Amino acid sequence: MEHLKLFAMEFIFTLAILFVLLGAGFDVSFGNIFLICLVLSLVGYAVGDRIILDRTKNTTATLIDVVLIFGFVYFMTDALTIGDGVLIASILSALSLALFEYFFHQSVVRTMEENETDSEAFAPGGELRTEVSEELTPYEDDEGK
């Protein structure tokens, strides 16, 4: 359920940012923006937020997201629309979404850490041990002395 909430949040914010940039600034239709956001959110969440962010730090994941966003926005906008300024639109979109992604990654890390601590509290680790001893009393036969 948490993954669905995080994906929905990423999709909504990506749609809002790209609608302002591409829709108002570069006259891209809403259908094309919706398609770009859907593909970008699916790939970005699966690759950038679940795989790369788990293995690297926030800054590295954000830089990889910038390249990913630029590539997807550039090629999809170029393929779906006929217009000038695709390069400028892609650069502005990548930089704007990178700012959002930096803060979104912090939210993803917090949410995943909360889920890990909740699941660890119910499932014991495999490090359960018992003490083994041959002695029944701590001292040898002291009563006879």
Image (cartoon, rainbow, N blue to C red):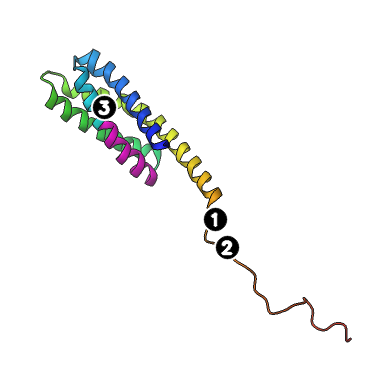
Residue 105 picture quarter: top left
Front residue of 141/53: it is 141
The percent coordinates of residue 51 (x first, y second) are 34, 44
Q: Is residue 82 magenta?
A: no
**Residue 124 numbered tag:** 1
Q: What main secondary structure does the magenta stretch of the protein show?
A: helix
Residue count near mark 1 (Cα–Cα under 10 Å), binned few <14, some 14–19, many ≥20:
few
Say what secondary structure mark 1 lies in.
loop
Q: Which residues are magenta?
A: 40-56
65 and 51: which is toward the camera: 51
Q: Position of residue 138 (x, y in %)?
A: 77, 76
> Which kind of residue does numbered mark 2 sit on?
Leu
Q: Residues within 10 Å of mark 3 (few under 14, many from 20)?
A: many
Q: Is residue 124 above or below residue 22?
A: below
Image quarter of residue 87: top left
**Which of the two discs, 1 and 3, sits closer to the camera?**
1
- Quadrant the N terminus occupies: top left
Q: Which mark is residue 37?
A: 3
Which percent across, then down, holds residue 20? 28, 16
Three-letter code for the amino acid on which mark 3 is drawn: Cys
Left/right of residue 13 with respect to residue 132 in the rendered view:
left
Q: Residue at x 21, y 32 (%)?
A: 72
Residue 62 is drawn in which quadrant? top left
Residue behind mark 2: 128
Q: CA distance from mark 1 to mark 3?
A: 41 Å
Is 47 contained in the magenta span?
Answer: yes
The C terminus, quarter of image: bottom right
Alpha-carbon distance for marks 2 and 1?
A: 8 Å
Q: In the figure, is residue 72 to the left or right of 140?
A: left
Instruction: Judge by depth and name the residue closer to the eye, 9 or 48.
Output: 9
Which numbered disc flags the more N-terminal residue, 1 or 3?
A: 3
Please report the residue visible at 23 percent of the width from the left and 30 percent of the height from the top.
70
